C-alpha cells in the first residue's frame, strides 16, 4: 500500500504551526500542542500507510484537533490559524475514512 503522503503533510503542517506559534507569540502551549498533535498524526499516518483500515488513532487525533480548533474559530472568528486547521481537519477526516473503505487490509503471512 502506498504511503499516506497527505497524512504526513497534515502532521508536518500541524507541527510547523506549533513552532510558528511559538516563534511569533512565544506561546509554549502552542508549541507543545503542535508538536504533540503533529507527532500523533505522523504516527497515525504511518499506521494507515501500513494498513489503510487502521484509522483509529488518525481519526481520534483529527477529531480532537478539529473540534478544538473549530471551537476556537467559532469563539474568535479568526480564520488563521484556527479556521484553517479546522477545515484541514475536516478534509483529512473525510480522506481517511474514504481511504479506509476503498482499501483492503493487507494479508498477513507468517
Image: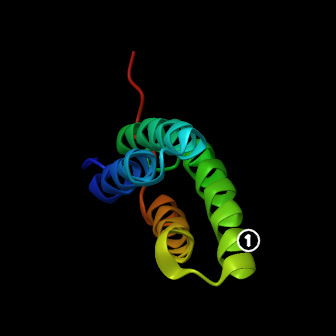
Percent x, y of residue 42: 41, 40
**Residue at 49% from the left image edge and 69% from the top image edge:** 81
Secondary-structure class at tag 1: helix
Percent x, y of residue 95: 46, 69
Q: Is residue 4 left or right of residue 28?
A: left
Q: Is residue 108 above or below residue 75?
A: above
Q: Is residue 57 above or below residue 81?
A: above
Q: How many marks?
A: 1
**Residue at 56% from the left image edge and 70% from the top image edge:** 82
Q: Is residue 98 above or below residue 15?
A: below
Instruction: Examine the rendering and report whether any part of residue 84 can be seen.
Output: no
Quadrant into which the C terminus falls: top left
Q: Is residue 46 left or right of residue 88?
A: left
Residue at the outermost front position: 25
Percent x, y of residue 37: 53, 43
**Residue at 52% from the left image edge and 49% from the top image edge:** 53
Percent x, y of residue 51: 43, 41
Q: Nearer the viewer, residue 27 or 45?
A: 27
Residue marked by disc 1: 71
Q: Is residue 15 left or right of residue 82?
A: left
Instruction: Examine the rendering and report whether any part of residue 25 can be seen.
Output: yes
Estimate how packed mark 1 is, as few (under 14), some (14 to 19) or many (20 or more) residues with alpha carbons within 10 Å: some
**Residue at 44% from the left image edge and 49% from the top image edge:** 52
Amino acid at each position: 500500500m502506498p504511503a499516506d503522503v497527505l497524512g504526513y503533510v497534515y502532521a508536518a503542517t500541524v507541527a510547523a504551526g506549533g513552532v510558528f506559534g511559538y516563534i511569533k507569540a512565544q506561546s509554549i502551549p502552542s508549541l507543545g500542542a503542535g508538536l504533540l498533535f503533529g507527532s500523533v498524526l505522523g504516527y497515525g499516518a504511518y499506521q494507515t500507510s501500513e494498513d489503510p483500515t487502521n484509522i483509529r488513532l488518525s481519526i481520534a487525533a483529527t477529531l480532537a484537533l478539529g473540534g478544538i480548533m473549530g471551537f476556537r474559530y467559532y469563539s474568535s472568528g479568526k480564520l488563521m490559524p484556527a479556521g484553517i486547521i479546522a477545515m484541514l481537519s475536516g478534509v483529512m477526516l473525510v480522506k481517511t475514512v474514504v481511504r479506509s473503505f476503498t482499501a483492503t487490509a493487507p494479508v498477513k503471512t507468517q
